[in-house]
Amino acid sequence: MEKENITVEELHNGLRIDVFLAELLVDRFSRSKIKKMIEDGFITVSGRNITPHYKIKSQETINISIGESAEVALRAQDIPIKILHEDEDLIVVNKPAGLVVHPAHGNPEGTLVNALLFHVKKLSQGGGPVRPGIVHRLDKDTSGILVVAKNDQAHRFLALQFKNHTIERTYNAVVQGLVQHEEGICEEPVGRAFLNRKKIIIRPTGGKDAKTLFKVVKRFKKATLLEVYPKTGRTHQIRVHMAFLGHPVLGDVLYGIQSPWIGRQALHARILGFKHPSSREMMRFDAEIPSDMRHLISHLESTD
C-alpha cells in the first residue's frame, strides 16, 4: 500500500478537506473518489479518522493510504516505443510528444508504462504500484529522453542521482521573443496554483526551490532557440520559469502562447547523462530534435 503525507499550509487553513484534496489531486482522483476514501479510512488527519467536511488547520498532516481500491489497474499494451538502450537494470527511451508517462485519473491506459510492461514484463516498484519503473517524468506534450528502472536497486541508485542533482540534463526550447542575454538563470520558487491544480505558478512564499539555466543557441526575428539546463526537477519548471521571464515556450497553451506552426509546447529533453547503477560508468544519450520542432525552426529561419 502506497502512503503519502501532505502538510497543510497557512493559506489553506479552514478549507474543507474534500474540497482541498479534490483541487490538489485533480489529476489523480475525483471529488467523489476522495470522499469515499475519507469515509473508508484511507484518508486521515494526523492519524485520526475525519469526515469529508472536516475543516483542515495549518500545519496538520493529511495521511493518504492508496490501497488497491484506489489504484489504477495496469495492463500491458502493444504501443510502439523508441528504445535507445536496454540492459538488465534499465531502459532508456525517447518519448514522443503526446504520450503520457504513467496511468493516472483521466489516463488509465495508453501510457508509456503500459507500453513498457508489454516490452519487459517487469519493472521496479520504487515509483509505486501505478508508476512502476518511473524515476522521473516528462510532461505529456514534452518529447525526449527518459530512463526507466527495471529493478528496485537500479531505481534507488538513479533516484538518488536525481535527488542530488548530479544528472546531466539538456533541453531544447523555442521561446517567444528575443532573449537578450547569451546566458541566464531563473531561481524563482514554484508551486501549484490553488484554484487550478493543473497549473504551476511562481510562489515566493510556500513554493519549492527551483533553478533553471539557459543559453541562446539562435535568435530568429520574433523567437529564440535555447538550450535549457534544469538543475531541479519541479513540475512544469522550464515552462513556468521561461513564461515568468517574458519568454513563454512557443505552443504552450497553459503558460503563454499558441503557435500555428506546432501543436504542442516546443520543448524537447535532448540529452540525459547519469551513472549506471551496476557498472558505475557514466552514460550519456542524445536524441535529436523531433520533426515537429524542426518544422517550427525551419519556418522561423525562413521568415528572418
Image: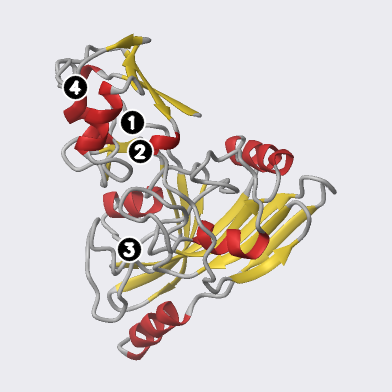
> Real-space Cα distance between discs 4 and 1?
27 Å
Q: Residue at label 1?
A: 207
Q: Residue at label 4?
A: 52
Left or right: 270 as drawn, with respect to 44: right
> Real-space Cα distance between discs 2 and 4?
35 Å
User: Which callout, 4 or 3, points at the residue further toward the start of the chain?
Assistant: 4
- Residue 271 appears in which quarter of the rendering? bottom right
Q: How is this picture coloured?
A: secondary structure
User: Which callout, 3 or 1, points at the residue further toward the start of the chain?
Assistant: 1
- For the residues carrying marks 2 and 4, which lies nearer the camera in this image? 4
Residue 34: percent from left, percent from top: 26, 32
Residue at point 29% right, 40% down?
Answer: 29
Observer-nearest of 156 and 177: 156
Residue type at mark 1 is: Gly
Q: Which mark is residue 188?
A: 2
Kindly state the secondary structure of the residue where label 1 is placed. loop
User: Which callout, 4 or 1, points at the residue further toward the start of the chain?
Assistant: 4
> Real-space Cα distance between discs 2 and 1?
9 Å
